[in-house]
Image: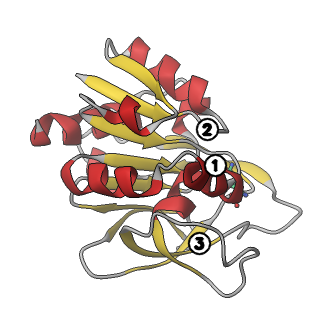
Amino acid sequence: MRIGVLALQGAFIEHIKMLRALGVEAVEVRLPADLEGLDGLIIPGGESTTIGKLAVMYGLMEPLRQFAAQKPLWGTCAGMIFMAKEIGNGSAGRDQPLLGIMDVEVERNAFGRQVDSFEAGLDVSVFANGDGEPFPAVFIRAPRLVAAKGEAWVIAKLADGTAVAAQQGKWLVTSFHPELTDDLRFHKYFLSLVAEEK
Ligand code: GLN
């Protein structure tokens, strides 16, 4: 299995380390040609406006959309924003470049100043394999899911009901950063989606 991590900006090295810890070949993607031969792609957290502008600059927008039509994609935090079809009214920079593939509406920086960063234990419905351990989710100036529409469904919520992860077929988005923990379950789950498509 060969997984790419979009390496334009943000926390891409941490994803690469997680993938390598799982014995998977992980490659940094900066140019359209880097997508060749990959079985899946992770779009990391960082700053979604910056990631979008750099993706436009490097001619990656259409190649990424074409890749996503065939293969699993997972966006964490800024990556989730970049994959979304809609950014809610409350969000800054509504005209930022988006891949716009996933049927979700997101709100950027949805958790206010006092809780810019926080950690929460999440029940993730797709991990319902009897382990029952909450997933330690790290939120950093995180977006929230305002709505999952069409084929997209919510797979994790905070205790107050705020939706923070969704899936749509082979695509995954999370508001938080599994790559900043040492819990490999989300990466394993993504790899299971990749294995299904391969
Ligand atoms: N606040 C960032 C944005 O709107 C996302 C933060 C993150 O990826 N940790 O793009």
Circle 2: residue type: Leu
Q: Position of residue 169 (x, y in %)?
A: 21, 60
* Residue at (51, 17) in percent of width and height: 17
Colour mapping: secondary structure
* Residue at (29, 37) in percent of width and height: 40
Which residue matches tag 3?
160
- Observer-nearest of 151 and 116: 151
Q: CA distance from mark 2 to mark 1?
A: 7 Å
Which residue matches tag 1?
54
* Residue at (69, 60) in percent of width and height: 49
Q: CA distance from mark 1 to mark 3?
A: 35 Å
- Observer-nearest of 5 and 145: 5
Q: Position of residue 72 (x, y in %)?
A: 27, 46
The image quadrant where one finds the N terminus is top left
Residue 8 bears which disc, if any?
2
Number of other residues with Cα within 10 Å of mark 3, as a class: few under 14, some 14 to 19, many 20 or more? few
Quarter of the render that holds ligand 1 = bottom right
Which element type, helix, strand or loop, lies under badge 1?
helix
Q: Earlier in the sequence, mark 2 or mark 1?
A: 2
Asked whether the beta carbons under mark 2 and mark 1 sit within 8 Å of each other, the answer is yes
Q: Quadrant of residue 36?
A: top left
- Observer-nearest of 24 and 35: 35
Circle 1: residue type: Leu
The image quadrant where one finds the C terminus is top left
Q: Earlier in the sequence, mark 1 or mark 3?
A: 1
Q: Earlier in the sequence, mark 2 or mark 3?
A: 2
2 vs 3, front mark: 2
